[in-house]
Image: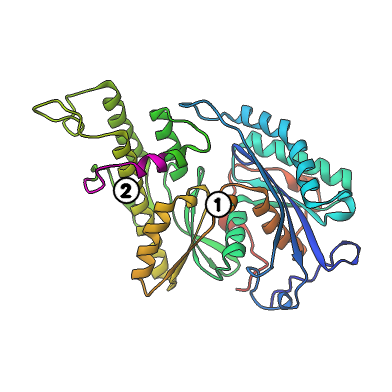
Amino acid sequence: MVDLNTISPKNGRNYYIALGLEGSANKLGIGIVKHPIKSQLSSGDNSHQCDAQILSNIRDTYITPPGEGFLPRDTARHHRNWCVRLIKKALKEAGFNDPSNDIDVICFTKGPGMGAPLHSVAIIARTCSLLWDIPLVGVNHCIGHIEMGREITKAENPVVLYVSGGNTQVIAYSENRYRIFGETLDVAIGNCLDRFARTLKIPNHPSPGYNIEQLALKCQNKDKLIELPYTVKGMDLSMSGILAYIDSLAKDLFRGNKQNKLLFDKKTGKQKVTIEDLCYSLQENLFAMLIEITERAMAHVNSSTVLIVGGVGCNVRLQEMMAVMCHDRANGKVFATDDRFCIDNGAMIAQAGLLQFRMGDIVKDLKETIVTQKFRTDEVFVSWREK
């Protein structure tokens, strides 16, 4: 039996307040989440029905010029420069003037992610904890995505497709762990799309993946997919070969290499393929691979529902393709959120951290707040759910 009401809120209130800090990559997110005390959370597996209220969910993104990625040191500098301002703005938006009395717990991303940005945000979290005398909770980034998705969509026990810039995993819950059934063997899907966007030198605002999605929508030859490598290995997949191949096609297109008969007509030399065609074919190919391994996981655990989380989960085409597969499998259903909660944000860290806090899982020594770039999803003991 899981009792999420074992820890009493501060000052005898009938609700909990958590401040969440996310900064594992180029997005700095500050979120404040409120959980009311509910009698049904004293037993059963109801952690997806906390009636969470998002009091604030502010985000600022470190944007680099077209054709460039973001370096850890520059991203960390961005987070240090903006963190205090965003915390002040979030507190004001939530209507809090005295954090030491208003906030029950401070939650921060412990990993996985880029070392320098993670470290910068952890320092801010420790400072606020000591300054306001508030307990700390370190949160796994992926668990934050999953618990935010479950709370927003009310999906009880779905197969989870976690797709982001640094991670690509198919996950299902079993015995107090989110078990990884399949994952990328090399680059994550978000990183694959971002790197192709760099080759195309398209803007990084609002995000490279979104801009590729918009180019794919303009494709005029959707009935003629460009043949790309399709690399599924059991429950896992590989995307580095696909990226290398489509990168070479894009470069030949830019150079006007008419020796490439896939891109140019053999007789007339006329261009047959556009950048939009490349973007569309890349998306279709990658998403088909994701759906294949997700369907295998669904069959393994006998599930008919999928929850898509992570930044790439915003992609409407991915959601459409997944919905078709789920409908064909016993009228299944896809759960997804919009960019407020799919893309890295502070509210998701507050949500997952508050669940941990309510089960008594807090930092007892600052040594426990050391961040780690490698922090697998299945390493976390999920105490707030039943077996």
Q: Secondary structure at mark 1?
A: helix
Q: Residue at x 79, y 58 (%)?
A: 17
Q: Secondary structure at mark 2?
A: helix
Tell me if residue 285 comes above or below residue 262 in the rendering: below
Task: State which mark lies toward you, 1 or 2.
Answer: 1
Q: Quadrant of the C terminus?
A: bottom right
Q: Which residues are magenta?
A: 212-224
Residue 361 position, x and y percent, is 75, 60
Task: Identify the residue under disc 1.
Answer: 342
Q: Residues within 10 Å of mark 2 (few under 14, many from 20)?
A: some
Q: Residue at x 36, y 48 (%)?
A: 286
Tell me the amino acid under the disc marked 2: Asn
Residue 71 in sight from this viewpoint = yes
State left or right for residue 10 relative to residue 224. right
Q: Residue at x 80, y 47 (%)?
A: 91
Given residues 130 and 321, the one toward you in this image is: 321
Tell me if residue 14 comes above or below residue 55 in the rendering: below
Q: Quadrant of residue 173?
A: bottom right
Tell me the amino acid under the disc marked 1: Cys
Task: Identify the residue under disc 2.
Answer: 285
Sequence-wise, which precedes: disc 1 or disc 2?
2
State left or right for residue 309 relative to residue 229. right
Q: How is the image coloured?
A: rainbow
* 3D distance between C-alphas at marks 1 and 2: 22 Å
